[in-house]
Amino acid sequence: MAESRRPQPYQPGAVSLFFVVKAGVFAVGFWTWLLVLVLRTDAATGAHVLAATGAITTTLVAVVLGARMALQHNAAVRHAETKKLLVDISWNAFTAAGNADSSGKVVPFPSSPVEDDRAMRHIGDRVSVFDRSGSRDRGGNTDRRR
């Protein structure tokens, strides 16, 4: 049987990798420039500050973009696994229902609460077996004596 080809899940690819590599190249350039400035001159100038700022900034950007790309990749893998697991669960439930030996009675889920006297009573209320109305006499009956 031919292998079914499922669509590949979203995974950060060439665009994210491009920006990570670009930030890395700029960071290497700034660090090299800073190293050359430090080795050639004795006093710190504005160029040193600019090179150091660029080196630190581009290094941090490269690290943050790389971490974001790794997190997106892991989230995409987890999402794909979850979707596959849900499909497997639903498929197994479907086949288990189809392979059942006896056809069970399907009980529909109630759409509205039942409007019955017994459902509206509190636990402490007592109702006589012979009283079909479901209501208690709350003291208006003067024929009964205690």
Image (cartoon, rainbow, N blue to C red):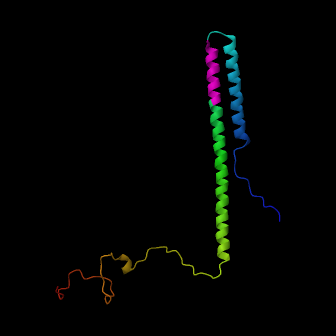
Q: Quarter of the image holding residue 61? A: top right
Q: Where's residue 37, x and y in %?
A: 68, 15
Q: Where's residue 111, x and y in %?
A: 49, 73
The structure residue drawn at horizontal position 65% and vertical position 28%, both measured from the top left corner, is 58
The structure residue drawn at horizontal position 65% and vertical position 20%, both measured from the top left corner, is 51
Q: Give the quarter of the figure containing the N terminus.
A: bottom right
- Check the image and report above or below for 16 versus 144: above
The structure residue drawn at horizontal position 57% and vertical position 79%, both measured from the top left corner, is 106
123 vs 105, left or right, is left
Q: Where's residue 91, x and y in %?
A: 67, 68
Give the farthest residue toward the right. Answer: 1
The structure residue drawn at horizontal position 30% and vertical position 86%, both measured from the top left corner, is 128
Does the magenta portion include 63? no
**Front residue of this view, candidates 67 and 58:** 67
Give the farthest residue toward the bottom. Answer: 130
Q: Main secondary structure of the magenta part?
A: helix
- Check the image and report above or below for 79 versus 128: above
Q: Give the quarter of the figure containing the C terminus.
A: bottom left
Q: Quarter of the image holding residue 13? A: top right
Q: Where's residue 113, x and y in %?
A: 44, 74
Q: Quarter of the image holding residue 3? A: bottom right
68 vs 2, left or right, is left
Does the magenta portion include 50? yes
**Front residue of this view, candidates 125 and 35:** 35
Magenta region, residue range: 44-59
How many numbered marks have been drawn onto this rendered protein structure?
0
